Structures are given as C-alpha cells and as structure tokens.
C-alpha cells in the first residue's frame, strides 16, 4: 500500500526534532524527563499488547524497548519472567532500578541492545512484544528475525505502532520516526516466519496506534 501524497510529513520545529531524538533514544536529564512522559503515553499500547498475548500461564516474555520498565514490573508481578533489550542506557538504568529485586533474583533480565541483535538464546521466550520501537530500527528485518529466533515454536509476538498509512503528527521528525505502512509490517513479519499475521486497526480512540499479532508455527 502506497502512502497517499497528501500524507507527506511536515517538517517539525526545533522542539519537535529534540522530542523525536529523545523518544528514539532517551539520554541525560532530558531523557529521564521524556522517559517518564513516555510511560504515560505508551501505557495503554503496552497494556493492550499484553492482553493480545493471552498469557494464560507463567512464561518468559521478551520485551524489545522496555523504557522505564513499567510493563516489565507488571509482568513480573503476574508471575512471568521478563527478558528485554533497550537502546538507551538511561532507560536500562531506570528500568533496572525499578525492577531491582527481580533483576537480582533472575525474574527479570533487562539489558542494553538495539534489537538488531538480541543477546538471548534461541527458543528462550514463550511470548514477545514491542510498542512504538519499529520506527527507530535501522535494520527492521534483522530485528524481526531476531525476535522470531528468541521465541519458542508456537510463541506469539505482538507489535504496537503507528502506521505510515495514517497522518503523521506534526512534531514527529520523519528522519527519526521512519513509520512503516501496514503492508510493510506484514511483509517484515511474514519474512521472519510468522503466520498468520492479524492486524487490529487503530483510530483516534487509540491515538492511531495499530496492533499486529503474529504467531510462530
């Protein structure tokens, strides 16, 4: 599906560019502030990911882009083990502090990584999810392949993101927020070996977040 010409992105102002850079890789004091704001902004997307994973028994769950560790903490409280990667050292530090006891006793393992290479063994996780991270991946197919590698056969992966078929908010810098279309996401997941791929469309009520449910045979 081609993005209509009317949806061509508008160049953001300076504040928008700074906000976009920090959203992609929060760092320093400003990163900590924006990280806290992102927890509120993405909480509903993450919660919906967990619902769509349909976790009926304790599993090891992979999270790509765990941010401040809010969702990881919830999963640990529910009896799951969480493994995850995040590209931001600032977020790794904050998430580890938030989940200090779980990280210490092995119920959580939250490490630095860009998702293109995930430092966990094959078939380690029973489920996986990521929310609003695909925009910042320079090697998307490699990242999807890595997620599939870490998942056990029969595992489920849920991705939450905006899509390029919708209008992009003016503050988002298109050189940082490289938002894929629905067709591109389905191709990425299919190439990684997921089938079927089910798309739940977003709208204004979900702040235009879409969800993709992908099962590994």
Image: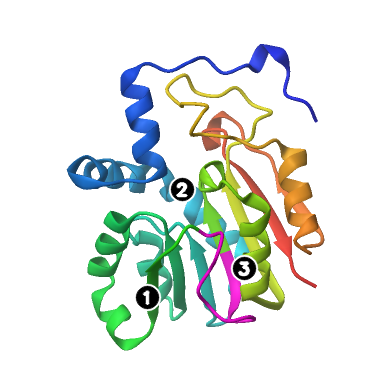
Considering only vertical position in the picture, is 24 above or below 51?
above
**Which portion, as a residue range, is magenta?**
115-128
- Number of residues whose C-alpha sits closer than 10 Å to that of mark 1, classed few (under 14), some (14–19) or many (20 or more): few
Is 74 part of what is drawn in magenta?
A: no
Left or right: residue 197 versus residue 72 is right
Residue at the bottom extreme of this rendering: 105
Which numbered disc flags the more N-terminal residue, 2 or 3?
A: 2
- CA gap, disc 1 and disc 3: 16 Å
Instruction: Work out whether 202 lies above or below 140.
Output: above
Residue 143 appears in the rendering: yes
Report, in whole angstroms, how far the alpha carbon at label 2 lies from the one at label 1. 18 Å
For this orientation, the residue located farthest to the left is 29
Of the residues under marks 1 and 3, which one precedes in the sequence?
A: 3
Q: Who's the residue at 48% across and 54% down the image? A: 46
Q: Secondary structure at mark 2?
A: helix
Q: Quadrant of the N terminus?
A: top right
**Residue where numbered disc 2 is placed:** 44
- Along the viewing direction, whichever of 217 and 12 lies nearer the viewer: 12
Q: Position of residue 116 (x, y in %)?
A: 56, 59
Q: Residue 29: x and y, percent?
A: 18, 44
Query: What residue did someone put label 3 on?
Result: 54
Q: Are marks 2 and 3 in contact (CB under 8 Å)?
A: no
Is residue 160 placed above or below 23 in the rendered structure?
below
Q: Position of residue 183 (x, y in %)?
A: 77, 40
Give the residue number, with chain letter if any, for mark 1. Answer: 77
């Amino acid at each position: 599906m081609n993005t209509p010409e009317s949806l061509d992105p508008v160049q953001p102002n300076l504040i928008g560019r700074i906000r976009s850079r920090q959203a992609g890789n929060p760092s320093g004091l400003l990163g900590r502030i924006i990280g806290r704001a992102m927890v509120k902004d993405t909480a509903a997307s993450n919660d919906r990911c967990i619902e769509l994973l349909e976790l009926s028994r304790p599993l090891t769950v992979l999270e790509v882009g765990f941010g401040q560790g809010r969702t990881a903490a919830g999963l640990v409280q529910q009896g799951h083990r969480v493994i995850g990667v995040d590209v931001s050292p600032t977020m790794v530090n904050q998430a580890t502090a938030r989940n200090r006891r779980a990280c210490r006793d092995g119920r959580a393992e939250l490490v630095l990584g860009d998702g293109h290479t995930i430092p966990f063994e094959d078939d380690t996780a029973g489920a996986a999810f990521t929310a609003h991270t695909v925009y910042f991946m320079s090697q998307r197919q490699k990242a999807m392949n890595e997620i599939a590698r870490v998942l056990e056969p029969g595992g489920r992966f849920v991705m939450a993101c905006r899509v390029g078929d919708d209008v992009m908010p003016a503050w988002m810098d298109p050189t940082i927020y490289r938002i894929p279309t629905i067709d591109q996401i389905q191709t990425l997941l299919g190439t990684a070996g997921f089938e079927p791929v089910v798309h739940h469309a977003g709208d204004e009520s979900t702040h235009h977040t879409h969800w993709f449910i992908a099962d590994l045979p």
